Amino acid sequence: MERPLAPGETLPPPTERITILGWIYRNLLSPWYNAVLTVLGLALAYALLTPILRWALTQAEWQVVVVNLRLFMVGQYPKEALWRVWLLLYLLSLTAGWSWGVLLGKRYATAGLVLLGAFIGLAVLPFAPALRLRWFTLALTALGAWALAYRWRETGWARKVAFALLLLYFPIVIIVIRGFAGWDRARQLWAALYLTGVLAGLVVGMWRPEQRWPAARWGQFGLFLVPLALAVLPGFVAWRFPLVGLAAVTWAAWLTGRSNPTTLKGFARVLVGLYLPLLFLLYQMGPSGFLTRAMPQVGTNLWGGLLLTFLLTIVGIVFSFPLGILLALGRRSAMFVLRMFSILYIEFIRGVPLVTVLFMAQVMLPLFLPPGMTIDRVLRAMAGIVLFAAAYMAENVRGGLQAIPKGQYEAAYALGLNAFQTMTLIILPQALRNVIPVIVNQFIALFKDTSLVAIVGLFDLLGIASTVLAQPQFIGKQREVYTFIGLIYWIFSYGMSYTSRQIEKALGVGER
């Protein structure tokens, strides 16, 4: 964005505004002190970059990266299961291309061409021919998805497909990477009951919600109290916790459908249409099912490298964001107990380092579990990261909430909106828009802080570096290894920062 004109200042000739020389003169050489700073900056960049490039191009031995590339990317993930990772990469290319074409169209085409060129650049590097072909086809997949989505962007179904891909991609990643251990019949039955409870609660809650009697009372008794009544009977002691969970999930779905019947109508139709296919998938997850045979479970002890870093980051972002919003709202609540709980949680978590939280999650969390129940150490690390990031996210969101004037609340109440509608439709969108830079900065910090899980025995991208440097033929190659890892962290961190700036520009943050 160009700076505003000073009083009395006139625009330069069009040739100076649109040509490369005109841009250089205006931004780098005018006035005279800008020219001095430009020359000093170029001299400093030359002095710093020349030895770095000389080392990188002539002296560095990048064989340590080429030989251990698979280890850097996926850790000890089985070689025979790598097709799952490539499948997810192709799905990511499809999702990114389709979503870009539908939601953005030709906007930010420069960024898209840069990403596409990066994929094509990977295809010409000295990798194996099969690997280069895969990188090239990934670029073609993204380009083809963008072209098709841009052609059909005006249709309603194209937008629905884009949102479905964005919403379902991460659950699909977890399912495909982990695989299936072969559920027993009891677990399959309970999964089917939970799916049925969600569908029934949603449909019953949406059915004539304006009638408080008898529809509401029937929904409460039929969907909520019956599972609770079964849970207290002596014959159902072994199923007490699953029954209570079924009642809670069903009641939550009923309340959701009752509060937003119009908004959730399309989602309910999709869920009804997918009900039988989902039951069939649950059946195929049994010990002799097709999914269990095709994708056997891969233990989390084999997850590592950039794959584990991504999973920890995405889980931290996805779950800490809503939890942080709830904590921020709880800290501003008029309920004393809720407010004090939120304050104590936020201040306690922000007062200890992430390493302490990770150690507590690994050592103390199993003490609170029932006898015989264990939680995988990767899940424990994810829980620690989520709980830690949520406290900082809560303070970021609270800052955005405090920036909203009181008149916004009063105007929403004057329009007849209740407290929930006021917060979700009026206040939160404005508050989150104001703190986009802070939130993205938190996401970037979270992405880099995942490297601390190496201290608790998990081999993420940075943890893999220590194993690579322990190989006898690559001892002393720290500069090559850490340069490669630092470049990966910089690429993804800069990508998140660039995306944040584009979102701010699109939303007019700081302008309106």
Image (spheres, rainbow, N blue to C red):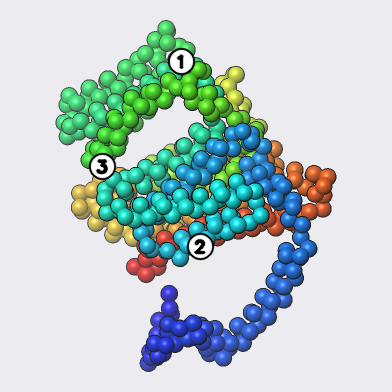
Image position, residue 427 (x, y; %): 33, 54
- Mark closer to the chain start, 1 or 2: 2
Image position, residue 142 (x, y; %): 45, 52
Image position, residue 42 (x, y; %): 64, 80
Amino acid at the residue labelled 2: Val
Alpha carbon distance from label 3 to label 1: 34 Å
Q: Which image quarter is the N terminus in?
A: bottom left
Alpha carbon distance from label 1 to label 2: 50 Å
- Mark closer to the chain start, 2 or 3: 2
Residue at figure coordinates x 63%, y 41% from the top left: 74
Tag 3 secondary structure: loop
Vertically, is 244 above or below 89? above
Residue at figure coordinates x 82%, y 53% from the top left: 476
Mark nearest the camera among 1 and 2 is 2
Alpha carbon distance from label 2 to label 3: 37 Å
Image position, residue 353 (x, y; %): 63, 47
Mark nearest the camera among 2 and 3 is 2
Extreme-front residue of the structure: 129
Give the side of residue 203 with respect to residue 16, left or right.
left
Amino acid at the residue labelled 1: Ala
Vertically, is 14 above or below 117? below
Of residues 147 and 309, the one nearer the viewer is: 147
- Mark closer to the chain start, 3 or 1: 1
Q: Residue under circle 1?
A: 186
Is any atom of residue 360 visible in this view? no
Tag 2 secondary structure: helix
Q: Give the number of the disc on residue 263.
A: 3
Tag 1 secondary structure: helix
Q: Residues within 10 Å of mark 3 (few under 14, many from 20)?
A: few
Residue at figure coordinates x 47%, y 52% from the top left: 140
Extreme-top residue of the structure: 235
